[in-house]
Image: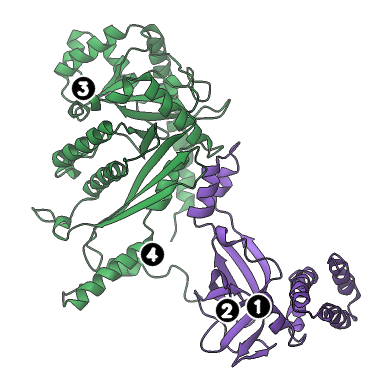
Amino acid sequence: MPVNLIDIQNKLNDFSAQARARKEKIAVRHQEVTNLVEAYAHQLDELRERVSQAAESVPRLRCAVPGDEPLTVAVPCPDLPETFTVMAADGSQINPSRHARVEFCVINVAVVKMVRGSGLAPKIFTHSQLLDYDSVFLPGGGMLPEGMVALKRDLREREALAELAGELVPPAVSMTDGPLELYREPQEAGDFDQTLERYLGVLAGLRQRELITLGYVDKPGGDLIARLLELIQLDALELASYTQARRRYAGVSDVSLLSPFLQHPGDRSAVFAIQSEIARRFTGDLTLHFFYLNVGLPGRPHLARVEIPGWVARDPALIGTLQAVLVEQAAMLGTRPYPYILHRAHEEAIVTLLESEHVEEMIVAAFNQRGIPVEEKSYKQYHKDLPKTKTRYQ
Amino acid sequence: MNEIEFGRLLRSGTTGFVVGCRVNQLDAPSFGSLVRVPLEDGYQVYGVIYDIHIEDDGLVRQLITAEDLPEEVLQDNRENRNVPVEIGVMAVGYEKDSRVYHLLPPRPPLSLDSIYLCSPSEIVRFTGAGFGYFRHLLRDRDKPVEELLAAHLMAARSAHIAAENPGWFQAALEELTAALRDDYPRMMCFLGAAGEIDV
């Protein structure tokens, strides 16, 4: 039986009323935060000082930290360089499953490298990694969780960019989809620390090669700026007992706050640093920063969050370059702006269901040749895989 | 002989087949071209291209909404992306043990068989064996048959003139006119198309 649409229909009145009430509540908060953005637009020292105080008493504080630019600034898009390199990496994976005939994990990463001004088709590199059999199993039993596989994939994406970072037409910009900051649910992050160290090493290597690197977040839901301004409202006593689980301005997104200031296509916001437990591990040249960029069309702003390391954030010329590159890339996809090169990397990296089945068959054949016993797939999976079309009249 | 391979077979049947090729191979085949698919010893299937079809996909649909596209993006879509180009071929005969037959092939070619454009001498050899293959072209009324015939005659005429057989074209026209004499609208349509051929 498919979804019972009558049940859904019966719920829609309540559901819509809840949505309206929530949006009205957030609109009130939004107005309060907007007033604060304008009031504190130039009081950057005071804001930084408050974050510093809060970080001492709130263990897992997460918020924006203003830089040297006013909160309401809109920096227009500079001109593109005549020639430059733009690269993107994206990955996908086959997660290990106890329902399959064999336990295995594949990470597939693609890098697309385009030299603008060359007139040539971009070069595409793909790398498929079958993880060691032993690494599919956790020391304490069970299999590698999806979150951990995703973490390994994020690392591989950056490593793949680093491997191709030689002999690039400067300036060179590289990007991945999603934040530069690694974040995983704690319960899924078995050897997170080890992976993070390797990740930081790769980012440092990219910096040495002067390959501008960024993380691109489309339709960002982040509220780091509202979190920052929330702190300014707290007195010392409230700050001491402040917990991010009970937030005053919950639901007020950065995009909603900054959209009125970034009206022109190509405008970027001020650059902020990120205060978070994990961001503290990104030090020196790698300190995490972000800004918002309007990659939309005239009259239809569309803000993306761009995360960059400190060495890029400190250099206005580098920020200008990546701003212009991103705006051009997003414009290539017309009415639904998103960096073309990132989409292409995604297209090249994606593992289809059919490919996943082929890989499994290859592994099963290899095991059979070597006399290694292979189990059946689970009966649950067997029945799920049955053709979905009707085979009889009734 | 310079063989021009331009694609591989996607699917086939007795009366025709569909070939897939990359966009950068598209300069070789054209509407009305005679093609061949060599199979086992001494057996090959001949056909005439009746359709060249370029599919779109989600990305291409989105790209056309952009104001202007850099050359690198155009090249990416033509060289790197799996832009599906499908070429429809109507089977018109076969060759077995060095003899040309204008009959439907006993067995269709198989998936991924290579497709070659016929050279002028191969065109002369196949079309010079009589006009029996015209009935395959005339049979399918869902296709632009009259235009297809004109395109085919134009290509074949050049090959026959180069082979010092200028009379082939006139004989072919008379054969087709006779075949269409009971179908006035189609005949007029064919004559209109054939009139575009520079004689």
Considering depth in this image, is A297 or B23 the residue closer to the camera? B23
Residue lying farthest to the left in this orientation = A140
Considering depth in this image, is B83 or A233 the residue closer to the camera? B83
Chain ID of residue with mark 1? B
Considering depth in this image, is A389 or A184 the residue closer to the camera? A184
| Residue at 63% across, 86% down | B94
Disc 2 + disc 4, Cβ < 8 Å: no
| Residue at 44% across, 22% down | A268
C-alpha span from label 3 to label 2: 74 Å
Is disc 1 surrounded by few (<14), some (14 to 19) or many (20+) residues within 10 Å? many
**Camera-nearest label, 3 or 4:** 4
Same subunit, tags 4 and 1: no
C-alpha span from label 1 to label 3: 76 Å
The amino acid sitting under disc 4 is: Leu
C-alpha span from label 3 to label 4: 47 Å
The residue indicated by pointer 1 is B47
The residue indicated by pointer 3 is A243
Q: Secondary structure at mark 4?
A: helix
Residue B129 in sight in this render:
yes
Q: Label the green chain with its letter.
A: A
Q: Label the purple chain with its letter.
A: B
Q: Position of residue B45 (x, y in %)?
A: 61, 83
Disc 2 + disc 1, Cβ < 8 Å: yes
